[in-house]
Image (cartoon, helix red, strand yellow):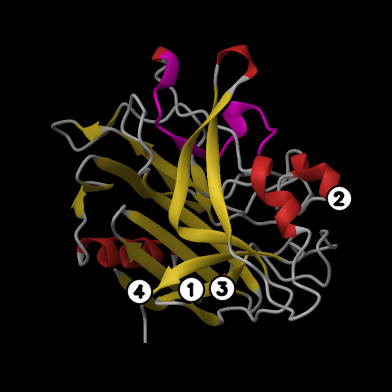
Amino acid sequence: MAFVTGSASSLADLLTGIQNACTTNGWTLSGSVLHKGTCYMELKVSGSFITLRGGRGIDGSNALTNATDQAVANLGIVSMGIAFAFPMTYFIHVLASPDEVYVVVNYGVVYYQTLGFGQSALSGMAASGNWYCGPTISTSIHLGFNTPQGAEYDGVGGGNGAAFSLFCRENAAPTNHSRGVDHGLDGLNTWAELGCKYDWASLYWRQPNQWNSESILIPIRAYAQRPSGFISPVLECAHARQVNIASLADQQIITLGTDKWKIYPWWSRGATNTRGTADSGLGGHAIRYDGA
């Protein structure tokens, strides 16, 4: 495992920082595709974004093959009129067993965006298990869910909002998903999946504990829609969790047993569980950390 932090003055600087962190820690860069084992991810500067999409391999020209049929993830979203401003600080967690990479950027003092990619360790999938997730392009002002019963508003990115939380967004049309898991179930060559609203929202809304003010770390899962209305889990992130950050500071490091976790808001910390005018409430990520 590795933790890398630095400063970027442009998208090109940021992309170079991501590539260097990965290649220094076991990944290979071929063209714009980072790969390790059978996990292939394309990251490149595209207009005003760094875009991320997954595939199953590369061809002789280092172009991604069997690429996702879902929308790309985009680092650089402008939401609620808040500019994606440079210089910015980046935090990169390169993790193994299974391979997962999380890229978090901090800009404008209180704002964050996150990309994640890796390979699912769950058994039973017919395809590679490669996955990716990140913010969605949107002009919507929705930045959080409204009620415990309204978990379909999926964390940051209710309805068609600009989703900043890992795998929380559930109800948008597949072409609007800025994420995917290459499960290949039921003979489908598809990366389509459902977010983790099924098992995290009720826990989130009951945090932090009123007795000791602590918040539990909640698994991040994704599911595949199956015939006859069934669903199957296709991903449980090994090195990241959802967490209510009411009693935790931005970038705080917490220790649970032998593991350390670093805390980040989904986008910008708010005062309550629900979204604010320009914040993402108390939703946050905890990412496994092995820095100093």
Say whether disc 4 or disc 3 marks the residue closer to the N-terminus: 4
Say whether disc 4 or disc 1 marks the residue closer to the N-terminus: 4
Q: Amino acid at mark 3?
A: Ile
Q: Secondary structure at mark 3?
A: strand
Instruction: Find the distance from the CA under tag 2 to the CA under tag 3.
Output: 23 Å
Residue 276, by quadrant, is bottom right
Q: Position of residue 271 (x, y in %)?
A: 82, 72
Q: Which residue is mark 4?
A: 3
In this rendering, the answer to whether 178 lies above or below 237 is above
Instruction: Find the distance from the CA under tag 4 to the CA under tag 2.
Output: 35 Å
Q: Secondary structure at mark 4?
A: strand
Q: Secondary structure at mark 1?
A: strand
Q: Which residue is mark 1?
A: 261
* Mark 4 closeness class: few <14, some 14–19, many ≥20 residues within 10 Å: some
Q: Is residue 19 left or right of residue 133?
A: left
Tag shown at residue 263: 3
Task: Examine the rendering and report whether any part of residue 250 can be seen.
Answer: yes
Q: Residue at x 33, y 44 (%)?
A: 41
Q: Secondary structure at mark 2?
A: loop
Q: Are marks 2 and 3 in contact (CB under 8 Å)?
A: no
Q: Residue furthest left?
A: 60
Is the C terminus in the top left, top right, bottom left or bottom right quadrant? bottom left
Q: Amino acid at mark 1?
A: Trp
Tag shown at residue 147: 2
Say whether disc 1 or disc 2 marks the residue closer to the N-terminus: 2
Q: Amino acid at mark 2?
A: Thr
Please check the rendered image and state whether residue 46 is part of the magenta-colored stretch, yes or no: no
Q: Are marks 3 and 1 in contact (CB under 8 Å)?
A: yes
Q: Amino acid at mark 4?
A: Phe
